Amino acid sequence: MKAKRLLAFVLCAGMLLGLTACSSAGSSSSDDDTVTLTFFDKNSGSKTFDDPVAQKIMEKTGVKLEVENPTGDPDEKLNLMLSGQNYPDIVLIGQGELVTRYIEAGALIQLDDLIEEKCPNVVEMYGDILEKCRYTDGHIYWLANWYGKDPGASSAVLMRKDLLAEIVGEERANSPEPFTQSEYMEILEKFKELHPEIDGKDSIALTLVSDSNGSFGALRSMFGMKNYYEPEKGTLQYWTRDPQYMKSMLFMNDLYNEGLLDDEWVVNKQEQWQQKLAAGYVFSSFGAYWDTDSVNKTLASTIGEDAQFYPYKVVADDLSPDQTTYAGANLLGWDAIGITNNCKNVDAALRLVDYLASEEGQYLMMWGVEGKDWTMEDGKHVPNQEVLDNLINDFDNTSNETGIRKWTWFIKNGNGSDGTPYDLSTKYEMSDTAKFSSQAFGESDYYDTTYYNGLEPVSSLEPLLSLKWQKVADIMNQNYSKIVNASTHEKAEAVYENMMEQMDDAGLKECEEYITRQYQQRLEIWGDSE
């Protein structure tokens, strides 16, 4: 009897030890050898990993994901996780200061050797872009999301096509041929002359979103400006030093003083801006063509199909059409995905990463399950038309049900090897405005903003310089509206001169020297120095 009790005790102890070992491993395995990894995705909202695409990912990789959803501010949660060192196996972070903090804290493992050894699909799909993922020490700690060149302009001058046709004729309104700065101003003046009021409201020739990079990105693009002014190769200065900056500001000043710019442009927020455009009394704005997608649906249903905002190219009077910069884009996208030093099963994590980054993984996440959501016909991916229609008409519910575009990890822009786009829902059947954008803006408008992103001093590395940089930005933000709204050019120029003096006093030159050093180091690491 004692022997049986002893044997039972030993067996129970062994089982408990085994359970303890599994639970403490961080990445667990079930009886079918499926490994469970935890994944924090700052963009995931409240989504759960239980859809048909998720099931197929688990089947293909042997990895089940426990997606840790952000609650409240995702960046705040990421900061708290880093402080407590309780981050999950994999994290998706926005590119910028936060991912730098994770690297500097040793929270992300080096991936370059592991990728070379175990991730052939990553090597093939990312290609030369992997070099641009290298940190200042030359190592890779994260992989880009939404990477690669995305055709089409990231900003434009938006004009209501039906109202434009009244002014310049239908043929010209349907043409992607650029307008000059002077032509654009004449068009705005003609609009106000023809339509001083619309539906009992004072018409607005041009309105903007006050705090939108898209609005002022389009203005800078019109004048051929980039993220920084580069007076000579390898030297960067703040873009307010660019000679084109004051030309663009004086153009806006003219629009304001001629009554062509919305009086409320300084206080317009995104929601208010959309309401104005959808109400039908605004002719033009600045931004990307997709910024007005919801507005265009409203206008098409209430006024007519042609009553939509189309993206046009406007060229500063002293530039040629090939000198504008409307298609500036970051080849690294906007997310950084890394494996943390808390991951107890790095091999499983790499297996997952390599599959998701592969062409098969891309089509699974972005097109859904083969045989159900799409089929191969004559060597090409062909979507189920009902699924495609549902994505266009009711994206959120269709995405949640099918899993299509619900999980967007290691996403590559462009087309697969068969010529079909990876992004089914927005690129397979392009909207009319997207097609127009691809015609209106050419290769000359493109430049890679990757070289300029994240060069500024950050608080985790340069706390004092970071404060100076923030002060510089605050001064600019406090003054640019004063330049635009000045009563004369002379007063606008005086505000500018005073602004630049304040920025220099706040430490702008010191910041520019730091940014230049970072830039030169980046060029050297990426092999682009001369």
Image (cartoon, rainbow, N blue to C red):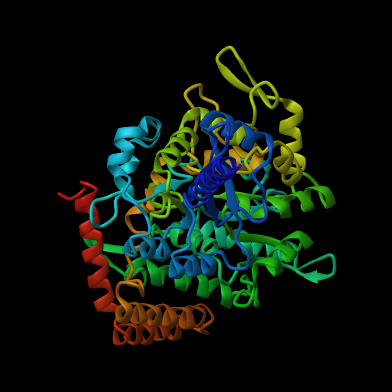
Q: Quadrant of residue 393?
A: top right
The front one of 394 and 372 is 372
Task: State the residue at coordinates (42%, 64%).
Answer: 98
Q: Residue furthest left?
A: 530
Task: State the residue at coordinates (84%, 52%).
Answer: 302
Q: x and y percent of residue 45 in the render?
A: 64, 56
Q: Is residue 185 left or right of residue 463?
A: right
Q: Residue furthest front?
A: 1
Q: Residue furthest top?
A: 378
Task: State the residue at coordinates (59%, 48%).
Answer: 66
Quadrant where the N terminus sits is top right
Total numbered labels: 0
Q: x and y percent of residue 489 in the render?
A: 45, 80
Q: x and y percent of residue 295 in the render?
A: 72, 55
| Residue 492 in the image: above or below residue 443 | below
Q: Is residue 152 left or right of residue 165?
A: left
| Residue 87 in the image: above or below residue 310 | below
Observer able to see residue 421:
no
Q: x and y percent of residue 458 in the render?
A: 35, 71
The front one of 231 and 485 is 231
Observer able to see residue 60:
yes
The front one of 270 and 356 is 356
